[in-house]
Amino acid sequence: MSFGLDQLAQAAAPAPLTDAPCLSQFLGTMPDPRGLRGRRYLMSALLTAAAASVLAGARSLTAITEWITDAPAWACRPSDSPSTG
């Protein structure tokens, strides 16, 4: 995982951070290197969830996965979608 984080840290940002009003919008500008087949989630959603889990204290891929799995439904809902109840 540290190799991937090192790559991300050295990647040129597609927009200055001051132009990113929120993390998910900024991460939405990152290119998605995955092929079209088998995509289930938006790359920006995956990166946002991973960043939130790290901010909450996750320090490994297993911990990130567990944090995302245990997150309440409201925390995983896109911020621009209306509440369903």
Image (cartoon, helix red, strand yellow):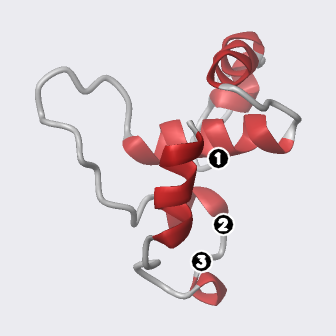
Numbered circle sitting on residue 22: 2
In the drawing, does residue 84 fall left or right of residue 44? right
Disc 2 versus disc 1: distance between alpha carbons?
Answer: 10 Å
* Residue at mark 3: 20
Graded by Cα atoms within 10 Å as few (under 14), some (14 to 19) or many (20 or more), the crowding at tag 1 reads few
Q: Nearer the viewer, residue 19 or 3?
A: 3
Q: Secondary structure at mark 2?
A: loop
Residues tagged 1 and 3 counted as in contact (Cβ below 8 A): no
- Is the residue 55 above or below the residue 68 in the image? below
Residues tagged 3 and 2 counted as in contact (Cβ below 8 A): yes
Residue 77 visible? The answer is yes
Residue 85 visible? The answer is no
Disc 1 versus disc 3: distance between alpha carbons?
Answer: 15 Å
Amino acid beneath label 3: Ala
Residues tagged 2 and 1 counted as in contact (Cβ below 8 A): yes
Amino acid beneath label 1: Ser
- Is the residue 17 above or below the residue 50 in the image? below
- Is the residue 11 above or below the residue 46 in the image? below
Q: Quadrant of the N terminus?
A: top right
Amino acid beneath label 2: Cys
Q: How many marks?
A: 3
Q: Quadrant of the C terminus?
A: top right
* Residue at mark 1: 79
The residue at the point 50 percent across, 60 percent down is: 8
